[in-house]
């Protein structure tokens, strides 16, 4: 077997940076920050896969329906953890920056591969966090489709992370076993304990100024949250896409508006006919993939009553389409979510505003915001 060892001079070339480091760049600090990054990335990964599943369900597994606020919780956690990961990851990278000056840079083929996998981990993690945060701002300076790249890259990040943990396990163990006691600051400045505590406080502040986009009472300090739910423009609920942006301002209020329901037969209903149907009132939240969410009280006919008009049942697969073309103008609803779904005409007891989906919008439990279709004009029951 050929030797996989690489032979490099034992001393670095002139000008090579020194690997000397201050006392803070120590495995006891790195292991703690790294563990926190690992936990944060783990949460982001699992909640992210759940979010992806809402948009691309597997045929054999029905979409979640309970608890009603499930997606609100998991996606809120996803985005807040993502925000908090930025200072955490930067601090973690800072704590190991001296490794860039390591001599020899590579000792063997295996070591080269290991360092390359760390480079992949750092690069993909930084791209993932940056583009994720830009997405919460609905700002897309990059050309690629955000959702599919974010999802695909998540597997690369998590794979490279697991490999990194496996390789570094002895160092992580040793670092965590080293106690950090004593003061936060001493005569030489910040101590290791002080550095870890400082990063913890920073991360706490990021969390506290973001969590208000999910937790109502903290909305006032949600300074970092891209969407402040307390600054809701309409009916105590933020508007994602306006009727003007969706180009439905005329069609939504037109006297020609009809809801078309297709199944074993086809029915068309006017707004007056829909509003004359028995209505139900439910507390269900809008939970956007961007992380903001808000609970609200909705009223309108049950979707099940409407699909029953054309032979549908609680087991039907129902496709809802909007007057809008493109974008989030169509969604499918099945099984558990269908039982609780409304085609809402009212929000908090008032008629829906045009921007919230007048005359009719879908609202169902534990469902991603982009699947809560506004300005609904067609309901198709496909398995009757
Ligand atoms: N037709 C249509 N429905 C839509 C959207 C859209 O762009 N078009 N946006 C969705 C998204 S991303 C969210 S988060 C919710 C927001 O609902 P709201 O604007 O009433 O708060 O509506 C959803 N329904
Ligand atoms: Mo959304």
Image (cartoon, rainbow, N blue to C red):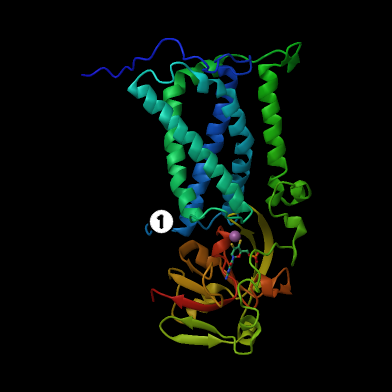
Farthest residue toward the right? 220
Mark 1 vs ligand 2: CB below 8 Å: no
| Circle 1: element type | loop
Using the image as rendered, state which of residue 349 and residue 211 is in the foreground: 211
Using the image as rendered, state which of residue 150 and residue 68 is in the foreground: 150
Quadrant occupied by the C terminus: bottom left
Q: Position of residue 287 (x, y in %)?
A: 61, 57
Task: Determine which quarter of the picture holds residue 186.
Answer: top right
Quadrant occupied by the N terminus: top left
Left/right placement of residue 77 relative to residue 265 reads right
Mark 1 is surrounded, within 10 Å at the Cα level, by few (under 14), some (14 to 19) or many (20 or more) other residues, namely: few
Identity of the residue drawn at 64% across and 89% down: 255
Q: Position of residue 102 (x, y in %)?
A: 49, 18
Asked if residue 299 shows in the view, the reply is yes
Ligand 1 is found in the corner quadrant, namely bottom right
Please state the total of marks drawn on the protein image: 1
Q: Position of residue 379 (x, y in %)?
A: 50, 77
Identity of the residue drawn at 59% across and 53% down: 135
Q: Looking at the image, is 117 positioned above or below residue 359?
A: above
Left/right placement of residue 361 relative to residue 145 reads right
Q: Looking at the image, is 245 positioned above or below residue 114?
A: below
Farthest residue toward the bottom? 255
Which residue is labeled 1 in the image?
61
Identity of the residue drawn at 63% across and 71% down: 245
Q: Looking at the image, is 85 positioned above or below residue 102?
A: below
Q: Position of residue 129 (x, y in %)?
A: 56, 43
Farthest residue toward the front? 14
Task: Determine which quarter of the picture holds residue 263.
Answer: bottom left
Q: Looking at the image, is 103 positioned above or below residue 33?
A: above
Using the image as rendered, state which of residue 357 and residue 383 is in the foreground: 357
């Amino acid at each position: 077997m050929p030797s996989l060892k690489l032979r490099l001079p034992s001393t670095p070339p002139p000008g090579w940076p020194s690997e000397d480091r201050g006392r803070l760049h120590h495995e006891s600090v790195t292991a703690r920050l790294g563990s926190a990054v690992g936990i944060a990335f783990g949460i982001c990964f699992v909640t992210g896969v759940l979010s992806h599943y809402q948009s691309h369900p597997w045929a054999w597994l029905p979409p979640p329906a309970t608890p009603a606020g499930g997606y609100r919780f998991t996606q809120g956690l996803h985005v807040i953890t993502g925000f908090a990961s930025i200072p955490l990851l930067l601090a973690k990278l800072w704590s190991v920056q001296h490794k860039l000056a390591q001599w020899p840079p590579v000792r063997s083929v295996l070591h080269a591969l290991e360092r390359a996998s760390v480079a992949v981990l750092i690069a993909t993690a930084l791209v993932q966090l940056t583009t994720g945060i830009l997405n919460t701002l609905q700002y897309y300076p990059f050309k690629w489709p955000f959702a599919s790249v974010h999802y695909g890259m998540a597997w690369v990040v998590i794979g490279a992370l697991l490999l990194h943990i496996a390789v570094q396990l002895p160092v992580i163990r040793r670092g965590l076993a080293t106690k950090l006691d004593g003061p936060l600051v001493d005569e030489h400045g910040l101590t290791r304990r002080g550095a870890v505590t400082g990063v913890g406080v920073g991360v706490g502040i990021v969390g506290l100024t973001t969590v208000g986009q999910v937790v109502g009472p903290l909305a006032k300090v949600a300074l970092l949250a891209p969407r402040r739910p307390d600054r809701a423009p309409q009916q105590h609920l933020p508007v994602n896409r306006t009727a003007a942006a969706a180009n439905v301002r005329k069609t939504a209020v037109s006297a020609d508006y009809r809801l078309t329901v297709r199944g074993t037969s086809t029915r068309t209903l006017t707004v007056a006919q829909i509003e004359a149907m028995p209505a139900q009132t439910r507390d269900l939240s809008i939970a956007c993939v961007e992380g903001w969410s808000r609970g609200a009280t909705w009223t309108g006919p049950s979707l099940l009553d409407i699909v029953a008009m054309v032979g549908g049942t609680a087991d039907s697969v129902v496709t809802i389409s909007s007057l809008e073309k493109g974008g989030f103008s169509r969604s499918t609803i099945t099984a558990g979510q269908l039982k609780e779904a409304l085609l809402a005409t009212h929000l908090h007891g008032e008629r829906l505003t045009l921007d919230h989906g007048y005359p009719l919008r879908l609202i169902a439990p534990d469902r991603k915001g982009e699947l809560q279709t506004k300005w609904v004009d067609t309901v198709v029951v496909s398995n009757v």
